[in-house]
Structure formats: C-alpha cells, structure tokens
Image (cartoon, grey):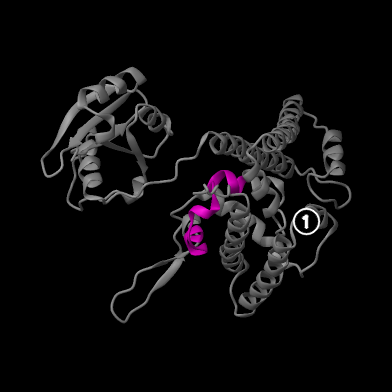
Amino acid sequence: MRTVRFLGLDVHADTIAVAVAEPGGDVRSLGVIPNRPEALRKLVKKLGAPAALRACYEAGPTGYVVYWQLAALGVRCEVVAPSLVPTKAGDRVKTDRRDAEKLARSYRAGDLTAVWVPDAAHEALRDLVRAREAAAQDQLRARQRLGKFLLRLGRRPPVPMKAWTQGHLTWVKTVQFEQPAQNATLLDYLHEVEHAVTRIARLERAIADAVTTAPASMRAVIDALQTLRGVARVTAVTIVAEVGELSRFTKATQLMGYSGLVAREHSSGARIRRGSITKTGNAHLRRIAVEAAWAYRHRPAVSGALKKRQASLSPAVTALGWKAQHRLHARYYRLLGRGKCPQQVVTAVARELLGFVWAIGVLVETQHRPTPVSVAA
C-alpha cells in the first residue's frame, strides 16, 4: 500500500513555507520556496509520486492559483478555512515555518475544514459581480460626499424631491457658489456620482453578457431563482457565483450556516443560550440575501416585472416562488408583532429565503444533471 504524505503550505505572495507530515512520523519543515510554478514542480518531483501526496493551504488573498497548479501536477490539494484551523491557547510564537507545520499536522489528523473551490466559470462570474458590488459601494460613498457637502453649505432643493433622481441631479447642476474653490469641489463630486452610474451600468451589461455564455445548468439556476420576489438578475447571479452548485449542500440549513445567518450558541448542560447571527460565512451571500428579504414586507403579489421573469419557468419553480411570498410575508409580520426590530425580522426572513433558494437550485440542478447511459448486456 502506498504511503500518503501530508503537506502543509503557508502561502504568501512571493514565498511558500513547506512542511511535511509522514503517516505516524514526525512533522518536519522543508524550508521556504518561491511562489512560482517551477518551484512547486521541483518540490513535487523531490517528494515522490504525486498520487501519494496530499497538500493543503489556507484560503487568502493569493486565491486558488496554487490549488490549480498542484492539481495540474496530479497532487490532491485542499484549500482550508483559516478561522477553523485549531490553535493552542498558550501558543504565542507565530512564524511561517510553524504555521506550515501546524497545517501539515492538523491535515494528517483530519482536523481541517476545506472550502469550496470554484471552477473557472464560477470564479470569473464571481470576480465580475464583486466588481459590480464594489462599484455600488463607491457610488454610495460618492453620493454621501456630495450630499453632505451641499448640506453643510445650506444648499437644499427649492421643493421637496427624492434624492438622486434625475430631477435632483438636474437641480444639483444648477447650484453655484461665490467661491470658485467650492464650485470646483462641487463639480468634482458631481463627476464622481455620474461616473459611478456609468460604471455600474457597464458592469451590469457585462454580467448580462457573461450569463449568456455561462454553462446551461448555471443559466437555468439563475433564471429559476428570479421567480423569487426581490431576486432579480444581479441578485441571482451573485448567489450562483458565491455558492456554486446549490446541490452540494445536502440540507437547506447548511446553506443558511454557510451564509452566517444562523444564531450563535453557547449552551452547556441544561442552559441554552443563543445570541446574534454568527456572521462566520460568506459575507457577499449574506448581504444579498438580506437585501432581497426586504421585499417580503409587502403583501404577496406578482408584479409586471416578476411575471415577466416567471414567464418561461416551470410550474414547479413558480409554485415555490409563490409559496415563499406567502410564508415569508407572514413570518415578517408575525415577528414584527412580537416586538422584534425590523432589522432582526429581515435577518430571520433572509435566513428562510435561503431555504427557498436551496430548494429551487436543487430542483433545477437535478433536472439538468446528465442521465447516466445504461449499457445493454
């Protein structure tokens, strides 16, 4: 039987600290190598057959490049969650060598939790939706800067109007100050607001184009998720890009836990104590689910936009969307009637919304899964 060796890699932008754990043996450091494909190739060649190696490293800013390089060399690799790596309470010394040895030792013991590594299509879509999210955050900051600038100088619209509508922007362009420096400041702030609008529109067009070239199963899930109220195209694409295949979760509660929307708990014996949500999950998925959950404060209805999104979907999928409207709307007002604040209520609704997301995703992915071809005897 071939002996399996476990590698712990402490990956940085320029270097990788390497440690190996032999089965039943000591853990030893192999030094530091450059973070380059040729250096990894030499390391694998030095350690023996790639099939007898198991490597791991922590998820971080270096992404999944090392994972793909090792996979191409035939080495089984896992990217592990940094927050779930076991640590000793009294350990006050941290070095790259010790981190690599700790990873190798914990990996051999089976104490590490692997994260999902997206394929090329999911990773590309994830980068695009996160760029759009960053653009939306920049737009919010640009609007706040301009709004606070006008408020501080006492400039307000002559008639009440909703902020950042076309009429509001038209009024902003008519504002003039006595000081040229303030006019230059206003012009710069206004330029940033308009640039953010153009940037978001460009990225949303790119998202629409990317969806048309995505795999058929991914497109089907994106279309099906839009049967849910509050889940339009950008929201559906974000969910698919951040989660990947929804059927990789065996239960809806696992997806809820992955989002960090479940309650933290500290119970012992007869005492049960639960607190706020853990937030130990995918922050992008959690944010988009909470945003979508606000739509369920309205009474169940199928508007024109929602009806258009549901036109080409199967009755089973649209039935789940209608069921979600009734259940989540009732839950929203039931919790509100118990004295919960709106933010807590929406968080609870978002958690249940992910249950419907999981149900729709599993249904559609099962329908698009290739049927195994039976060979006649």
**46 relative to 236, above or below:** above
* In this rendering, position of residue 42 left or right of residue 142: left
Most common SS among magenta residues:
helix
- Quadrant in the rendering for residue 27: top left
Residue 29 versus residue 178: which sits nearer the camera?
A: 29
User: Which residue is under mark 1?
Assistant: 310
Q: Which span is picked out in magenta?
A: 238-256
Q: Residue furthest left?
A: 25
Residue type, mark 1 in image: Gln
Residue 133 versus residue 47: which sits nearer the camera?
A: 47
**179 relative to 361, above or below:** above
* In this rendering, position of residue 122 left or right of residue 141: left
Q: Residue visible at 78% across and 56% down? A: 310
Q: Residue furthest bottom?
A: 270
Count of labels in the image: 1
Q: Residue visible at 12% across and 45% down? A: 24
Image position, residue 239 (x, y; %) = 60, 49
User: In this orientation, does residue 235 appear?
Assistant: no
**192 relative to 358, above or below:** above
Question: Is residue 240 highlighted in magenta?
Answer: yes
- Quadrant in the rendering for residue 199: top right
Image position, residue 73 (x, y; %) = 35, 26
Residue 172 versus residue 369: which sits nearer the camera?
A: 369
Q: Residue visible at 71% across and 61% down? A: 295
* In this rendering, position of residue 249 left or right of residue 353: left
User: In this orientation, does residue 74 appear?
Assistant: yes
Question: Is residue 20 highlighted in magenta?
Answer: no
Image position, residue 206 (x, y; %) = 70, 32
Image position, residue 331 (x, y; %) = 64, 74
Residue 168 versus residue 99: which sits nearer the camera?
A: 99
